[in-house]
Image (cartoon, helix red, strand yellow):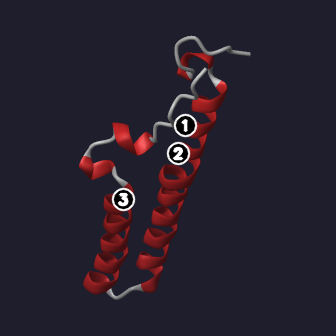
């Protein structure tokens, strides 16, 4: 019985949904809000929103995908013993 290779969630995503593009977009959003408005009370909520966005899409979703991949029988290879 050979172990099935782990498939990364990022293998299924287009270029605009890769970690580097998510991080870059968040940095640009915060920087642009500061550069255009120079108001911390605008940039701070933007920063909080970006940090929440990063937490969901860079930490929680990949962790859930990895957990599903290892626990779900349909992710196991042919001939493997699901349990």
Viewer-proximal residue, 62 or 83? 83
Asked which quadrant contains residue 2, the reply is top right
Q: Residue at x 43, y 69 (%)?
A: 46
Asked which quadrant contains residue 31, the reply is bottom left
Q: Secondary structure at mark 1?
A: helix
Circles 1 and 2 in contact, beta carbons < 8 Å: yes
Q: Residues within 10 Å of mark 3 (few under 14, many from 20)?
A: some
Asked which quadrant contains residue 42, the reply is bottom left
Q: CA distance from mark 3 to mark 1?
A: 18 Å
Q: Report whether 16 appears left or right of 22.
A: left
Q: Secondary structure at mark 3?
A: helix
Q: Position of residue 73 (x, y in %)?
A: 62, 17
Query: Of marks 3 and 2, which one's residue comes earlier in the chain?
Result: 3
Instruction: Tell me if residue 43 comes above or below residue 25 in the rendering.
Output: below
- In front of the other: label 3 or label 1? 1
- In front of the other: label 3 or label 2? 2
Outermost residue toward the front in this view: 1
The tally of labels here is 3
Circles 3 and 2 in contact, beta carbons < 8 Å: no
Instruction: Tell me if residue 62 comes above or below residue 37 in the rendering.
Output: above
Viewer-proximal residue, 31 or 4? 4
Instruction: Tell me if residue 65 comes above or below residue 37 in the rendering.
Output: above
Query: Of marks 3 and 1, which one's residue comes earlier in the chain?
Result: 3
The residue beneath circle 1 is 65
Viewer-proximal residue, 78 or 48? 78
Instruction: Tell me if residue 59 comes above or below residue 70 in the rendering.
Output: below
Q: Residue at x 32, y 49 (%)?
A: 17
Q: Position of residue 61 (x, y in %)?
A: 53, 44
The residue beneath circle 3 is 22
Of the numbered discs in the image, which one, if any, rests on residue 62? 2
């Amino acid at each position: 019985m050979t172990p099935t290779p782990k498939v990364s969630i990022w293998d299924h995503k287009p270029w605009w949904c890769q970690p580097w593009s998510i991080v870059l977009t968040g940095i640009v959003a915060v920087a642009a809000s500061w550069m255009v408005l120079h108001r911390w009370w605008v940039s701070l909520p933007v920063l909080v929103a970006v940090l929440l966005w990063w937490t969901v899409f860079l930490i929680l979703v990949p962790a859930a995908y990895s957990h599903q991949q290892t626990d779900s029988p349909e992710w196991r290879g042919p001939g493997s013993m699901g349990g």
